[in-house]
Image (cartoon, rainbow, N blue to C red):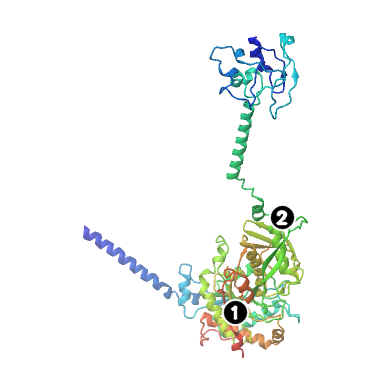
Amino acid sequence: MMTLRQLSLFLLVALAMFAGDVSAQAPARSNTVPQESNDSSNMAPEEETDIEVVEEYVPSRQYAVVLDPGHGGHDLGVRSSKSQLEKSIAMKLASAIRSKIRNKYANVTVHLTREGDLERSLLRRLEFANSKKADLFLSIHTSGGFSPQSLPVDIFIPGNSTRASAEEWVALNRPYKNKNKLFAKSLSRHLQSVVKGRDIEIVASDRLMLEGLAMPAAMIEPLDLSNPQDEMLIENDSYINQIASAIAKGIIDYLGVRDPAPEPEESNE
Amino acid sequence: MSDDVKDTPEEFDGSETIELGPENIIRRRAPNEENEDSQPEGISDDSSGEEPKENFETAPTGDFPSFPGRIPSVQMPLMDDSAESLKKLTYEPPSQLVDKEEVENPEATGSPVDGGFGNRRYLIFLTILILTGFLAWIFPDPGWRPKEAMVDSQMEIGSGAKSEAQQLETVTTMLYVPDKNVSNLEIIEHPVNMPQELEGKIRIVLEGLFADSNAQNVIFPKGVEVRGVYVYKSTAAISLGGEFRKVFHVGARTELLAVYSIVNTVCHNFKQIKQIRILVDDVEEEIFVSHVDISRPLGVDNTFVVKTKKSVKKTSSTNVKPESKKETVSGGKHGG
């Protein structure tokens, strides 16, 4: 009797170990599933599988990036002395970044929170990004103030929320604390060569409505509309293109997307 | 004769002057008189079997000592058949000499005795009063606080109104203002005359922060109005006039600087205030202007505070924390 019990216990343990091994291998096997099933929209892995594991180990999958051109509609944002509006420049930058990524990386889908001069609340923008299950969120703004002093290029990332834990949505970004930093550093690395004579600061703040994003997130203010020097530069589209290229590289670099291999799929448009 | 003696206490009420005959006059001992026995003879020996009247002395006519604090005596005829035969005496009944029956059952005699029972009643009343006060001190009404605490804990609407009666005191406040580059906050000293009430003080400090005369005020537009300051426990609600929003077109950094300039300044100067709820036109808003979430109270954040020579000297080290949430990459070195 004793031996039988021991034997059955041993079998149970062995079975459990075997089951654990099988479940660990399961995501690797399912790697091909999202690629086959998804087209241009963002990937949607099977509900049953562990989403995070799938995302980590997929070598060449579909990525979704949400770009948020700040302000819009009645909300003009910062106004330069030459009547340039933040909402327009943010839109211009976001569109430029999207086209640069689209042209090069077919497996990266870029969504904009607004297409055109529309007014959207911050919460609605967050909701949009979460609904897309994006891999990355970048809000694009410009800086400005009451002084012509040049402000640093700010990259804001979500901070540790000091708000009540009852608000669950502010905890959505907590798992991405380190990824936020990595993303911001990637942007900073690529922008250094473009922004001239300006410091780049990475600031963690829990007051910019970024904590509700279930993905690595940042908010960038690469241009200063209250600074006369930047105002001059903004008039030149090539400068905006340089900034857009640097940001696009920062995004791609962070995502770890390789340069597009000659896939049999559609080539660039 | 004995009836007369027994009845006399009924007639005494401390304000009467009674005409007594030589035999039935009650002698009351003056306080300063020498006390031969420990108890008055007239009331102590009911059990002795002696007639009480025999223990009384006849008071000398007209020279009875007056008791300090007594009501002046009044001449009053004794309701007695033999009144004509009585000598007129000025008599004042002291409290010590009371018929035993009256002491035991004052209502039965119908005579109010102010000396004994009145004092007790007064003492009982006083004890109840003290007890009530003591209980009220131990278990105070939650809504009640001393005047000083009330200022801290109660929300008072319209507290910004400056009354002329307010006493002003000169206080050195610390303002969080932008530095030369308008990219961070530094702390400067700012002496102001302050009223007594907390809300008034907060208002004065904020007005100093927003003042056009403040040379370092380059993050607030002109004419920012403090509509009201409401304090509830450790949270101060500061209502700003919404007009400033029409001209406050700034980036996220400047907006954060503005918000934390308010929050840090108030929390620094008033240690009892731990967080600030910013209202706009007395309404709870989600966003300050375009970027900063003010839907919940904000606590001190020293992300943008830099150590300056002034602030290091004049503020305690605990108030200026080293930056921990910020990483800077110098663009000047890499600029091409």
Question: Which residue occupies the foreground of this view, A198 or B201?
Answer: B201
Tell me which amino acid carries mark 1.
Glu
Q: Residue at x 63, y 20 (%)?
A: B107
Residue A55 at x, y percent in the picture: 48, 75
Classify mark 1: helix, strand or loop: strand
* Residue B293 visible (yes or no): no
**Image quadrant where residue A87 sits:** bottom right
Give the image location of residue B37, x and y in percent: 56, 22
In this view of the protein, which residue sits in the foreground, A123 or B175?
A: B175
Q: Is residue B64 visible?
A: yes
Quarter of the image that includes the C terminus of chain B: bottom right
**Most extreme residue toward the bottom, as rendered?**
B336
Amino acid under label 2?
Ile
Q: Secondary structure at mark 2?
A: loop
Image quadrant containing the N terminus of chain B? top right
**Percent position (x, y) of residue A59?**
47, 80
Q: For residue A28, which quarter of the picture?
A: bottom left
Q: Chain of mark 1?
A: A
Residue picked out by circle 1: A201
> In this figure, which residue is indicated by the disc labeled 2?
B157
Label 1 to label 2: alpha-carbon separation: 41 Å
